């Protein structure tokens, strides 16, 4: 056993770093580092730059445009991307739908959708949750009824992240009512320009617009947009969810956040000539989360190393999700604490693209409480941490 | 020992509770926090008419009480409705300072208008770079002709932009001074902003603002003592408020566990959630006890008072976070939406930790006071 990176790993890191230095626009990286929203175009431009180098996606086979990175390379790559302030690519097509199509889609679907996903021609969003079907996803009620060579879809989806940018939605719909609830679910691809679809924003706790509800009223979807077999959608949905969870540890982002936290703690005056970093109580809070993160990084590497490229880890992804979200939430909690009274300021107008309004307090201080509130979502989405514990209870403990 | 509220306090509690329930619905509050001024002048006038400003003033100043229990009873009920009216700034801090026995100049004369609800007051004390250190005052009051001029900057001042009159702390010729500066004074720059908890605060700077002898409310040892009392009352007020917010969040969560059905049963049937809500209830009881202790110590001498207040604020910061996070988590997705009241309760609970010093600040202050 050795826990060091090899010379090849280090050479790879240098290659990634040089590429980012050459290609990543400074204007974009500055906004990313400050935790500010990007425009759809900024994100897609970056995706296209990466795609030219075949670095936009890692879980797809190389013949479909995947990077072919080993798990360790992927980790190094992500670390460098976060450190450089590269935009996070939209996961909906690349890491959620893509693997499902590769495993269960028809040749026509793969040939049509995958290149469009890679190049950012279509922005996808997810239609899983419904108002009455959250943790109990299989109880979903949105109906798709066969009518000739179409399905007619009626119902409502919710928590659709970045649906306002999307061209297409992949949906779980009910096509059967026989047997267990899981048995009558199908996986359908729906063009959001189809008549009968309405998307409404949901404003979240901190005042942002990331999620939406989507209403379907007699929406006609061609049968060729069914993925795999009718009533087998639950299998595909679960496959997608394990992929959704693997990136959720967010170790590279957490490391950057820790760095920023220490920076703030070194700069923040306590009002008595000392700095926040000198405060034993706060220093202890930082140390605890740093130790947790050191362990988490290795736990994550242990799990990703075990999972062969392309394969999805099972219950381990649930463990990573719980621990990863706890650490990231703790970091946002410390950030809002660190900036003291300036955490109070709710001034989104200061941080809008192109704004020249001066911030309240130190430059980004007023962003952190919003981030803390926003990050309450990460222990809820992608299967709440309670649901992850149920999975571990069943799959690991066998209870 | 008697843990029952007196008849007067029970009546006060019921009156405020009814007012909040009937007049301060979640929809009303949402309109208010999005409005230009961030509070409702009509509702504020009604609160004053009900005697809620007078309730936290001593009888010696024409008030109806002014004890820790008076503040507690009112604040708890305001917390239940996450009320954003300028009550802490104007009644608890502002009116309290104007009603100080040693207060002089034009200050005491303002009290009638404040009690009647026609004037908003704010305390401009904390400064940039002071974090939660309330002992640091760099603003300066210098002799100029018959009067003084005020120079300095104040930071994150609760309701500072809405106030008709500010009570500003500064270093004067006779030590600490608390002086009155009216809205729109020459040389004063005010930048108001929204806060995450639905309130308002302001960055305020004074560049040679003229202050007359009549504007000096308190100075020297009187100012020090009065400011200490005011800050203790303000700190205590948000602790008492948080009890109301926490109980409202707990009630909403309990209701949700009873009614939200997943996997064919109400989610309250799951032991994993039951036990967590039990822990929330236990911690809220602890919080209530520490607030009661602080309430009864609020009139005591500074050392006892501050020790009890810091104990309360430290514990409230810890428990407030637990209750906020658990209430949101157990509600799932809707817990993180703007249109749902629990999200705003959570925001108020977390933001209370940033008003008047956070849990770490008060833990350290308690350690010092307790060791003395």
Image (cartoon, coloured by chain):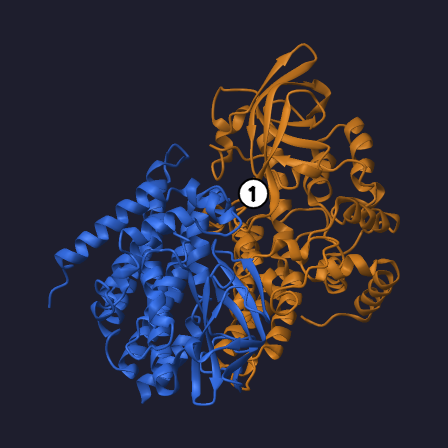
Task: Decide: is A352 above or below B185.
Answer: above
In this view, the residue in front, A85 or B152, is B152
Residue drawn 35% across the image and 60% down it: B113
Q: Is residue B299 visible?
A: yes
User: Which residue occupies the extreme top position in the image?
Assistant: A148
Q: Secondary structure at mark 1?
A: strand
Tell me residue B272's x, y (percent).
Answer: 37, 49
Task: Decide: is A72 above or below A105.
Answer: below
Chain that is coloured orange in the picture: A
Q: Is residue A102 left or right of residue A24?
A: left
Q: Is residue B94 left or right of residue A238?
A: left
Circle 1 crowding by C-alpha within 10 Å: few under 14, some 14–19, many from 20: some
Quarter containing the N terminus of chain B: bottom left
Residue carrying label 1: A203
Tell me residue B41's x, y (percent).
Answer: 42, 49
User: Which residue occupies the extreme front position in the image?
Assistant: B146
Q: Is residue A398 visible?
A: no
Task: Decide: is A178 above or below A3.
Answer: above
Tell me residue A306's x, y (percent).
Answer: 65, 56
Task: Decide: is A141 above or below A218.
Answer: below
Tell me residue A156's x, y (percent).
Answer: 55, 28
Chain that is coloured blue in the picture: B
Residue drawn 65% across the image and 70% down it: A260
Residue drawn 56% across the image and 62% down it: A332
Quarter containing the C terminus of chain B: bottom left
Question: Disc 1: which chain?
Answer: A
**Count of residue discs:** 1
């Amino acid at each position: 056993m050795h826990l060091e990176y090899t010379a090849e790993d280090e050479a790879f890191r240098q290659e990634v770093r040089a590429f980012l230095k050459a290609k990543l626009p400074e204007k974009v990286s500055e906004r990313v580092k400050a935790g500010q929203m990007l425009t759809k175009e900024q994100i897609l431009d970056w995706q296209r730059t990466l795609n030219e180098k075949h670095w936009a996606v890692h879980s797809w086979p190389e013949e479909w445009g995947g990077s072919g990175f080993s798990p360790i390379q992927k980790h190094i790559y992500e670390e460098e991307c976060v450190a450089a302030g590269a935009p996070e690519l939209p996961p909906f097509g690349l890491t959620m739908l893509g693997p499902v199509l590769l495993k269960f889609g028809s040749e026509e679907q793969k040939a049509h959708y995958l290149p469009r996903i890679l190049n950012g021609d279509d922005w996808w969003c997810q239609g899983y949750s419904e108002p009455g079907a959250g943790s109990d996803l299989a109880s979903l009620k949105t109906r798709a009824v066969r009518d000739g060579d179409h399905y007619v879809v009626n119902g409502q989806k919710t928590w659709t992240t970045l649906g306002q940018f999307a061209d297409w939605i992949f949906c779980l719909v009910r096509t059967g009512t026989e047997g267990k609830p899981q048995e009558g679910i199908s996986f359908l691809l729906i063009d959001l320009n189809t008549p009968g679809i309405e998307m409404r924003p949901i404003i979240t706790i901190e005042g942002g617009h990331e999620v939406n509800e989507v209403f379907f009223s007699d929406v006609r979807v061609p049968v060729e947009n069914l993925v795999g077999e009718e009533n087998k959608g639950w299998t595909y949905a679960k496959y997608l969810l394990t992929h959704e969870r693997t990136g959720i540890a967010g170790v590279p982002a957490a490391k950057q956040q820790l760095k920023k936290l220490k920076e703030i703690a070194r700069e923040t005056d306590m009002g008595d000539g000392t700095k926040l970093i000198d405060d034993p109580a706060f220093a202890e809070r930082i140390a605890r989360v740093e130790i947790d993160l050191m362990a988490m990084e290795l736990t994550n590497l242990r799990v990703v190393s075990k999972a062969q490229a392309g394969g999805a880890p099972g219950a381990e992804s649930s463990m990573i999700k719980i621990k990863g979200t706890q650490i990231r939430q703790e970091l946002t909690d410390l950030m809002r604490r660190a900036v003291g009274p300036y955490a109070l300021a709710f001034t989104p107008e200061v941080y809008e693209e192109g704004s020249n309004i001066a911030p309240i307090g130190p430059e980004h201080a007023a962003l952190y409480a919003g981030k803390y509130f926003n990050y309450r979502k990460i222990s809820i989405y992608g299967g709440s941490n309670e649901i992850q514990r149920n999975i571990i209870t069943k799959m690991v403990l066998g209870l | 020992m008697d843990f029952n509220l007196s008849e007067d306090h029970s009546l006060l509690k019921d009156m405020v509770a009814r007012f909040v329930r009937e007049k301060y619905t979640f929809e009303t509050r949402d309109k208010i926090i999005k409005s230009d001024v961030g509070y409702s002048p009509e509702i504020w006038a009604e609160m004053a008419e009900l005697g809620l400003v007078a309730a936290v003033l001593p009888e010696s100043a024409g008030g109806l009480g002014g004890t820790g229990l008076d503040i507690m009873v009112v604040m708890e009920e305001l917390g239940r409705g996450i009320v954003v009216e300028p009550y802490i700034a104007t009644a608890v801090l502002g009116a309290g300072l104007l009603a100080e026995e040693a207060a002089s100049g034009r200050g005491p004369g303002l009290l009638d208008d404040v009690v009647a609800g026609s004037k908003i007051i704010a305390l401009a004390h904390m400064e940039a770079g002071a974090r939660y250190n309330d002992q640091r005052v760099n603003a300066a009051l210098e002799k100029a002709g018959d009067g003084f001029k005020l120079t300095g900057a104040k930071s994150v001042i609760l309701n500072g932009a809405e106030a008709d009159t500010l009570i500003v702390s500064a270093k004067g010729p006779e030590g600490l001074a608390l002086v009155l500066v009216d809205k729109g004074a020459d040389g004063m720059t005010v930048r108001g902003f929204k806060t995450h908890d639905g309130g308002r605060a302001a960055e305020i700077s004074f560049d040679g603002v003229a202050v007359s002898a009549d504007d000096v409310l308190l100075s020297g040892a009187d100012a020090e003592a009065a400011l200490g009392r005011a800050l203790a009352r303000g700190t205590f007020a948000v602790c008492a408020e948080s009890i109301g917010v926490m109980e409202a969040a707990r009630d909403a969560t309990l209701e949700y566990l009873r009614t939200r059905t997943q996997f064919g049963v109400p989610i309250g049937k799951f032991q994993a959630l039951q036990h967590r809500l039990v822990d929330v209830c236990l911690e809220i009881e602890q919080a209530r006890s520490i607030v009661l202790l602080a309430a009864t110590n609020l009139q005591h001498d500074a050392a006892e008072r501050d020790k009890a207040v810091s104990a309360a604020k430290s514990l409230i910061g810890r428990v407030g976070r637990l209750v906020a996070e658990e209430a949101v988590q157990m509600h799932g997705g809707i817990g993180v939406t703007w249109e749902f009241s629990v999200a705003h309760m959570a925001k108020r609970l977390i933001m209370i930790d940033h008003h008047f010093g956070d849990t770490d600040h008060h833990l350290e202050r308690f350690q010092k006071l307790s060791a003395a």
